[in-house]
């Protein structure tokens, strides 16, 4: 095929490499991201494939009334009770906090459990699907517990007072939680062992679930009956709710990744447009020649379109292969956070990649080439015959429309696409404006600089539209990389370092009222100083000023979406400050009359004012009070902090558990196990562990994001390559003239070097300014730590940018100085 | 014998902002198959414009042109392209070789575009004929000017044109190389019995043609 032959020849001639590379990059970026998103989605979807293990689940913070079971029986519904709670597990000297699920033997009502005798296996033949549950005296453990407890099948696990034998490894539960939890360790035990374990005490934090299955009408009927009970502690969950929640989370994740990737696609597309433009310019004479030999415009167009299609097809295949390799790297970096045995990616990412490749070709390469066949054959004789290409504004509009459609497709949301592209346009404009000012300033300064600097700055200024395009591409990518790097390397450490050395690092929770005193003495006996003890009462906010909470209030405040902890304190806790109203010591009346102190953010979200009356439901009882003060607090101080505080004694008649925090040095952590053995119902949350887990998750996720950003940076470099290429002939001619006039190679090299070095330096400087601003926002609003400057950003951004772009730019333009001037001039003539 | 080229009252007028400019003024001549013609004249006389019109690369403002009996001025670009494909070959002052193709590929390309299965074999033969059998794989940038023009001649004749148009074929070459190239051009032209129309500044080259048209300000000067 002639088109194929011509394509091969053009490739050999080096005219297609940039076009092909841009296409390959665009496809690789999208493939890798789409594949990761697809596999993560599949893995999580599979783990929750049956989602509920039932047709309906009633979720409650208190035990179900006997009437629930009776009613379900009357409706011929199958039932299974589940208890979920956190508890310390022991295997010899090893201990770990785990999420425990106690089930009845009828569990699961829908779907199956996946269990295995082999740990950490992705080989599905090792898995066994079952509807059995652990027998009394047995426990099935999640894989994550194996290294944490140093346990193997057959070992005994202690949960509270019960000693249970580990007999299976749970790979997936039909109503399984995802593997993302910081307390990812999970176990399944028989409900019959709950009593022996004695882990459930009045006030213990336990989630009660009633699973139901049966005819649709009966299930709906039952669901309505539960709604009619109007209990604020219960939540009805249908498979659709469960699926919708998961789906929307996954959709958001996928959208975010693809939008990040679309920046790469955009940059690659810009490079493609620049490269295609140059290709078209260089092919004007060839087309004139072909036409002088008798080829019609139609034949020429067919020839080029076929060549483009072939090129796009091959580039897409290569892009897919490279994307696959990158996705493997990405998967490896996040695999620890995912369930085992991640399924393979489906056809969707391939479709996404293919459509992206073809769209880039259509939107960015073809518009540049479309008018090529209209070149007059007379140009073979007269170079002054004009060639009419489609205008740059038309091409911009076509390109923008294609990118817009792609982003809408990736994000599946028109509004998101508009915001995203609008935001990007705005950032580009600001960056461009900033770059323009820096260039203008540079031009003024150049008057006092040496001739090489003067020439380099003049070059940057003369090609300022290209310069600014590259600056926007580089600075935005470097900015994101700097932010990621800082978050990963120092921001979390800064956050941890802000804690005093002896700040509490353990929360002791779930302590029954009668255990407070002995636990306190035990800790003191070991020379630890527990902070104040707080009693905790689980409650749900139900009314404000006698009116049920509106949907908006529920949406706005996390504190009313789920149950909150109420507590009491005589003293104003450390780092708390009364902003409005008065603390108890300035109030008169009985403790009950002194009302409640509310945290400022919650008060703002709920629109609470001093004197407002609020009602809580506590285990079915109503607690009514009024707002007597609004207080600020520091969440990051590692002390128990509460949204709602009452005077001491007000909550004593409600089921409560106590909590305290304590500093335990690393080398004495084994003491925790001794305490726990004596008081097995207590749970100890090791904050160091949690911080480490958070760090690990952020580390892994940001490493993955950094990989994507590096890809985006490569796309930015291709834009630079394309920009250098499009001014290559001009540069070569200038260089040849300068050399003919006696300039040394070194002079020209230094002009080029300074030009690219400055481009990188300025891009890096803009990136550093932006990155410091973003980090300031992160520190102030997310980590809530005082802002400090990051000298590393100001060094790494400009110098890294200058080095990277300087080296790449010089490498790309090496031919300008290595080809003898006569040859350059002859080639250009 | 059929005339290879006939022109009747050929005029080319260019309209500028101020006035009308007559580039060619009432050109009439004819050539039989196998004859050669040199078009000479000072710069701006309209030589290249006439060559372009004769080759069907453009249409005149008025008048008729016949190539091998076919009237081409009434044809649209597509139809003229078909006539060029059938009858016409070119040699240019600037060689017009494609820089990304080797000598062999440059010569083979027009044949390949016609779907000729033996394109490469013929290209090889013609390159050997012009004395470049050893340079088949060389790219234009590694060939001298004379060699590049020999490749262009091989490419032009490989398509076996009935009429060959040459625009200043020696204009970019020194006199010795120019002489060698023009010898080659005339030799192969005689072998192929093609009609040769060339535009040149060089009196000696023009005198080798059977006919000479001298143009001055768009008119044939007798």
Image (cartoon, rainbow, N blue to C red):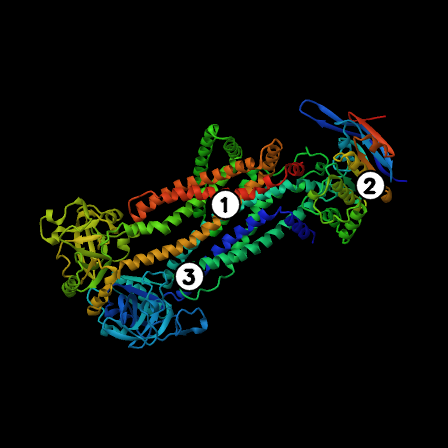
Mark 2 is surrounded, within 10 Å at the Cα level, by few (under 14), some (14 to 19) or many (20 or more) other residues, namely: some
Residue B203, picture quadrant? top right
Which residue: 68% across, 32% down? A384
Where is residue A48 drawn, in percent x and y? 39, 65
Q: Nearer the viewer, residue A566 or A531?
A: A531
Marks 3 and 1 close (CB-CB < 8 Å) = no
Where is residue A350 drawn, in percent x and y? 53, 57
User: Residue tagged by mark 3?
Assistant: A335
For marks 2 and 1, give the CA distance.
Answer: 52 Å
In the picture provided, is A786 more to the left or to the right than B88?
left
- Let me know if marks 3 and 1 both belong to one chain: yes
Where is residue A356 drawn, in percent x and y? 53, 51
SS under mark 1: helix
In the picture provided, is B61 more to the left or to the right than A812?
right
- Let me know if marks 2 and 1 both belong to one chain: no
Quadrant location of the N terminus of chain B in the rendered image: top right
**Which numbered tag is attached to residue A716?**
1
Foreground mark, 3 or 2, reads 2
């Amino acid at each position: 095929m002639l088109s194929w032959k011509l394509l091969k020849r053009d490739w050999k001639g080096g005219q297609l490499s940039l076009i092909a590379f841009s296409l390959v990059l665009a496809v690789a970026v999208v493939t890798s991201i789409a594949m990761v998103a697809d596999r993560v989605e599949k893995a999580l979807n599979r783990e929750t494939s049956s989602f509920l293990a039932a047709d309906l689940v009633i979720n409650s913070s208190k035990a179900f009334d006997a009437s629930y079971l009776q009613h379900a029986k009357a409706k011929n519904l199958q039932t299974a009770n589940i208890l979920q709670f956190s508890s310390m597990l022991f295997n010899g000297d090893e201990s770990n906090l785990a999420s425990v699920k106690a089930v009845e033997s009828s569990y699961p009502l829908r779907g199956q459990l996946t269990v295995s005798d082999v740990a950490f296996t992705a080989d599905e033949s090792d898995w066994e699907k079952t509807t059995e549950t652990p027998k009394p005296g047995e426990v099935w453990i999640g894989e994550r517990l194996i290294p944490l407890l140093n346990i193997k099948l057959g070992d005994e696990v202690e949960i509270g007072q019960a000693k249970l034998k580990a007999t299976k490894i749970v790979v997936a539960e039909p109503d399984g939680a995802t593997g993302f939890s910081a307390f990812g360790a999970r176990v399944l035990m028989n409900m019959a062992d709950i009593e022996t374990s004695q882990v459930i005490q009045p006030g213990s934090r336990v989630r009660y679930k009633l699973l139901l299955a049966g005819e649709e009408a009966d299930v709906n009927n039952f669901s309505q009956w539960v709604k009619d009970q109007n209990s604020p502690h219960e939540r009805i969950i249908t498979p659709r709710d469960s699926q919708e929640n998961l789906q929307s989370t996954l959709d958001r994740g996928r959208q975010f990744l693809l939008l990040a990737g679309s920046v790469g696609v955009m940059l690659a597309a810009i490079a493609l447009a620049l490269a295609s433009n140059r290709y078209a310019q260089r092919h004007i004479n060839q087309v004139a020649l072909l036409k002088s030999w008798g080829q019609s415009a139609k034949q020429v167009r067919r020839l080029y379109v076929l060549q483009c299609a072939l090129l796009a097809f091959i580039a897409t295949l290569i892009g897919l292969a490279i994307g696959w390799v990158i996705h493997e790297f990405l998967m490896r970096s996040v695999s620890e956070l995912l369930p085992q045995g991640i399924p393979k990616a489906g056809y969707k990412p391939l479709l996404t990649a293919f459509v992206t490749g073809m769209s880039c070709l259509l939107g960015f390469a073809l518009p540049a080439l479309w008018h090529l066949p209209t070149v007059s054959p007379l140009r073979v004789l007269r170079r002054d015959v004009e060639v009419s290409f489609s205008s740059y504004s038309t091409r911009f509009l076509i390109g923008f429309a294609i990118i817009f459609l792609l982003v809408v497709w990736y994000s599946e949301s028109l509004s998101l696409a508009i915001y995203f592209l609008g935001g990007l346009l705005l950032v580009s404009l600001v960056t461009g404006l900033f770059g323009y000012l820096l260039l203008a300033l540079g031009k003024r300064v150049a008057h006092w600089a040496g001739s090489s600097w003067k020439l380099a700055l003049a070059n940057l200024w003369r090609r300022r539209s290209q310069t600014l395009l590259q600056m926007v591409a580089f600075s935005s990518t470097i900015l994101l990389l700097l932010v990621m790097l800082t978050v990963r390397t120092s921001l979390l450490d800064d956050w941890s370092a802000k804690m005093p050395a002896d700040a509490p690092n353990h929360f002791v929770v779930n302590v029954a009222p009668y255990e407070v005193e002995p636990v306190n003495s035990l800790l003191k006996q070991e020379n630890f100083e527990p902070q104040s003890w707080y009693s905790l009462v689980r409650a749900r906010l139900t009314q404000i000023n006698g009116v049920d909470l509106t949907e908006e209030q529920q949406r706005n405040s996390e504190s009313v979406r789920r149950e909150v902890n109420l507590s009491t304190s005589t003293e104003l806790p450390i780092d708390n400050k009364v902003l409005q109203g008065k603390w108890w010591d300035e109030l008169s009346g009985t403790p009950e009359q002194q009302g409640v102190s509310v945290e400022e953010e919650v008060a703002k979200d709920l629109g609470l004012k001093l004197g407002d009356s609020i009602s809580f439901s506590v285990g079915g009882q109503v607690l009514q009070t009024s707002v007597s003060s609004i207080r600020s607090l520091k969440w990051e101080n590692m002390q128990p902090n509460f949204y709602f505080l009452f005077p001491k004694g007000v909550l004593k008649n409600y089921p409560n558990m106590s909590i305290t925090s304590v500093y335990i040095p690393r080398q004495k952590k084994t003491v925790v196990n001794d305490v726990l053995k004596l008081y097995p119902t207590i749970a100890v949350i090791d904050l160091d562990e949690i911080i480490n887990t958070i760090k690990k998750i952020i580390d892994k996720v940001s490493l993955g994001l950094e990989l994507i950003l590096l890809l985006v940076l490569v796309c930015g470099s291709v834009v630079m390559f394309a920009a250098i290429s499009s001014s290559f002939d001009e540069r070569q001619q200038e260089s040849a003239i300068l050399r003919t006039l006696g300039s040394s190679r070194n002079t020209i090299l230094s002009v080029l070097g300074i030009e690219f070095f400055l481009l990188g330096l300025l891009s890096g400087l803009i990136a550093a300014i932006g990155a410091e601003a973003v980090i300031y926002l992160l520190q102030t609003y997310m980590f809530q730590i005082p802002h400090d400057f990051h000298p590393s950003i100001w060094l790494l951004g400009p110098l890294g940018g200058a080095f990277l772009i300087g080296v790449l730019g010089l490498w790309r333009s090496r031919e300008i100085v290595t080809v003898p001037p006569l040859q350059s001039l002859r080639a250009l003539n | 014998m059929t005339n290879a080229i006939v022109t009747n009252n050929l005029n080319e007028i260019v309209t500028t902002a101020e006035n009308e400019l007559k580039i060619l003024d009432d050109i009439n001549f004819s050539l039989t198959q196998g004859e050669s013609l040199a078009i000479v004249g000072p710069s701006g006389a309209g030589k290249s414009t006439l060559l372009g019109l004769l080759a069907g690369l453009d249409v005149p403002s008025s008048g008729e042109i016949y190539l091998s009996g076919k009237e081409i001025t009434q044809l649209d670009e597509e139809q003229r392209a078909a006539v060029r494909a059938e009858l016409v070959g070119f040699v240019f002052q600037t060689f017009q070789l494609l820089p990304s193709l080797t000598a062999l590929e440059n010569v083979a390309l027009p044949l390949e575009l016609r779907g000729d299965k033996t394109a490469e074999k013929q290209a090889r033969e013609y390159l050997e004929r012009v004395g470049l059998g050893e340079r088949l794989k060389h790219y234009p940038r590694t060939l001298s000017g004379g060699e590049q023009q020999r490749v262009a001649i091989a490419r032009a004749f490989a398509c076996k044109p009935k009429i060959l148009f040459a625009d200043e074929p020696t204009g970019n070459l020194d006199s010795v190389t120019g002489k060698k190239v023009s010898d080659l051009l005339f030799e192969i032209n005689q072998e192929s019995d093609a009609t040769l129309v060339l535009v040149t500044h060089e009196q000696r080259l023009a005198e080798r043609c059977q006919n000479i048209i001298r143009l001055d300000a768009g008119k044939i000067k007798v």
